[in-house]
Amino acid sequence: MKTIDEEIWAYIDGSCNAAESQRIAEKIATDDNYAVAYQELSKLNDLMAADELEEPSMSFSRNVMDAVALEIAPKKLSTRVNNNIIYGIAAFFILSLAAIFIYVLANSTYPAQSAFKLPEASFSFNMSEMLSPLSMKIFLMVDLALALLYMDRLLRRKLHANKTTLS
């Protein structure tokens, strides 16, 4: 079922057939609600008909397309996973599982346990033999050289970044 506004708009636009047009005209003449709505909508229709629609200039679409062409095209988002990270994580878990498996085998009791023995490792060594004054000097010189190389690389990156932002 149509509302009063829909019926009156159809009457004003002339989009209804003759029978409907006659019925709506009778309702406008007899019903105050229809008469008020008809007056308001006919005034609105007259106002809309009186105003000319603004059209964009002839070169509007060309200007818009030129502005779009000047925009920087967005880069595709590419996410790459370094395979070395995946291999490292996999190796960690495989080694952890292997260590747990070996620990369980070594500490379990079963009939053939006498045949399976893990070798005993002795980790006793003298640190004073390894840390002689000469080895400490070599260690500190290598550390100093690595620190200088790192600082050089860091400063070159900053210098390159400043040059690209200035130009």
Image: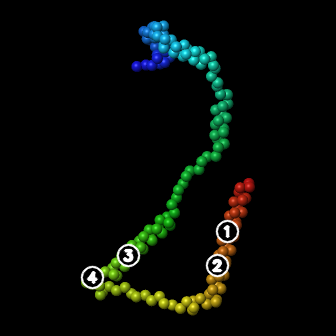
Q: Residue under circle 3?
A: 100
Find residue 58 and report its image quarter.
top right
Q: Is residue 129 left or right of residue 149?
A: left
Q: Amino acid at mark 1?
A: Arg
**With respect to residue 116, does 98 lie above or below?**
above
Quickly name the residue at label 2.
143
Q: Residue at x 52, y 58 (%)?
A: 80
Three-letter code for the amino acid on which mark 4 is drawn: Tyr
Which of the two residues, 99 or 91, is positioned nearer the viewer here? 99
Residue 5: percent from left, percent from top: 48, 18
Whether the residues at callouts 3 and 2 have beta carbons within 8 Å, the answer is: no
Q: Residue furthest front?
A: 32
Q: Amino acid at mark 2?
A: Asp
Residue depicted at 50% across the width and 11% down the height: 35
Q: Quadrant of residue 65?
A: top right
Crowd rating for badge 3 (residues with CA inside 10 Å; few <14, some 14–19, many 20+)? few
Q: Position of residue 74 (x, y in %)?
A: 60, 48
